[in-house]
Image (cartoon, rainbow, N blue to C red):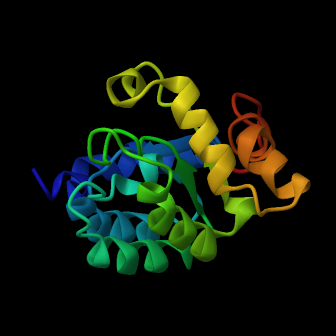
Amino acid sequence: MTNWLLRPELAAPLEAMARHDLVFDALVLPRHLPRLIQVVDRHPDLQFVLDHFGKPHLATGDIAAWKDDIASLATRSNVVCKLSGLATEAAPNWQVADLGEAVDHALACFGPQRMLWGSDWPVVNLAGGYAHWFAAAESLLADLSSEARAAIFGGNAARIYLSSRGRPTSRK
């Protein structure tokens, strides 16, 4: 179902998540991204994490619309992007270069302070395994400063998920 994110009954739970400083991890496909943009705009006080980069169609190379939607999402300050799940979207026997265009685009749009790395374990075992994916991510981010890499590989996740989760907030 392409429009599931727009169901009216999701509004109250998303508002409650925002009130409690929780994070909405959006596991969506490229066809859902335009709807996610609408939801993000309706809930500006809620932190969103776009899981798996929105699962771009890397195996087919059909990522033009995905790139447009990623650029649009990145203009919303309450969205960060998780660098994960790309191995399972690439063709079998993928190589690091097969992921480069998507990673470069998302990094250019979100920047290193709004990107998180994720292992996608155990699912990544279906597409080369954890070690292959981790090495690929390190290679794809090798040109960044050590501070930017540290942010992507852990610092940003700690800031996004742990800074206030489960703690009382000043919001009412």
Q: Residue at x 83, y 46 (%)?
A: 150
**Is 97 or 76 nearer to us in this picture?**
97
* Number of on-image labels: 0
Q: Which corner quadrant of the image does residue 140 belong to?
A: bottom right
Q: Is residue 108 visible?
A: yes
Answer left or right for 127 relative to 159.
Answer: left
* Residue 103, x across and y down, in percent: 53, 62
- Residue 112 pos. (x, y %): 73, 62
User: Where is residue 124 drawn, in percent x and y?
Assistant: 41, 28
- Taking 140 as reference, is 92 left or right? left
Which of these two is toward me, 47 or 58?
Answer: 58
The residue drawn where x is 58% and y is 75% is 109
Considering every residue shown, the one lying at the far left of the view is: 1
Judged left or right of residue 62, residue 99 is right
Front in this rendered view, residue 169 or 151: 151
Q: Relative to 60, is 73 above or below? A: below
- For the question of whether residue 47 can be seen, the reply is no
Residue at (75% x, 34% y) in the render: 162
Q: Position of residue 84 (x, y in %)?
A: 50, 42
